[in-house]
Amino acid sequence: MILWNRILVGLDDRPRSLNAVRYLAGVLGGSNTCKVCLLAVYVPPSADMHPDPERLEAHDSDRRVALEMCLADAHRLLVEARLPAENVSTELLEILPGKNVGSTIMEYQRNNGYGTVVVGRRNQSKAEEFLFGSVSNTVVHQADDCCVWVVS
């Protein structure tokens, strides 16, 4: 069942990612009726990127820490905007093989009944978007039972 006061926010470890959270904080500031889940999707590094196992493990660890810090910053921003801390949760998911970040966000939305999905936009060129895909584009195209906010 979809609940419209449940909001899922997709984040990554880039500073622009928090723009969506700042926008949401401005819109929801002081609300005690909304439940917000801050979701970061972890993409494990490929062994091809780092043939040295130690460097691969260090990169893996650094990436997880960066995502956890982003989730903590986003949580703090929403609580500072007077959302009750118990209404804001965080989740760090590891991507499943064969999935992409946008699909993972939308699968989480459907499985957990979020009525709104909020994502940031990276302002990629058309060539970059074609080659690498776009999380916000995937989210918009897969949304069929929810509202989507794309924040630039």
Image (spheres, rainbow, N blue to C red):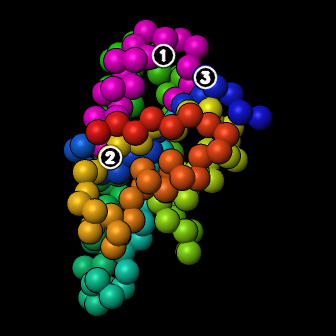
Eye-nearest disc, 3 or 1: 3
| Magenta stretch: includes residue 4 | no
Report the span colored magenta. 17-36
Eye-nearest disc, 3 or 2: 2
Q: In which quarter of the image is the N terminus?
A: top right
Q: Quadrant of the C terminus?
A: top left
* Labels 3 and 2: the sequence-earlier one: 3
In the image, residue 47 sits, relative to residue 104, either above or below, namely below
Considering depth in this image, is 10 or 128 the residue closer to the camera?
A: 128
Q: What residue type is labelled 1?
A: Pro
Q: Residue 5, which numbered label?
A: 3
Query: Which residue is at a point 35% across and 51% down the rendered structure image?
Result: 12
Q: Mark 1 — residue?
A: 84
* Labels 3 and 1: the sequence-earlier one: 3
How far from the left and from the top, in percent, is residue 42? 43, 60
How far from the left and from the top, in percent, is residue 147? 56, 34
Image side of residue 113 versus residue 83, left or right? right
The secondary structure that dominates the magenta segment is helix
Secondary structure of the residue carrying numbered label 1: loop
How far from the left and from the top, in percent, is residue 126? 28, 62
Q: In which quarter of the image is residue 81?
A: top left
Considering depth in this image, is 57 or 36 the residue closer to the camera?
A: 36
How far from the left and from the top, in percent, is residue 76? 34, 27
Q: Residues within 10 Å of mark 2 (few under 14, many from 20)?
A: some
Q: Mark 2 — residue?
A: 121
Eye-nearest disc, 2 or 1: 2
Query: Which residue is at a point 39% across and 25% down the rendered structure image?
Result: 24
The CA span between labels 3 and 2 is 23 Å
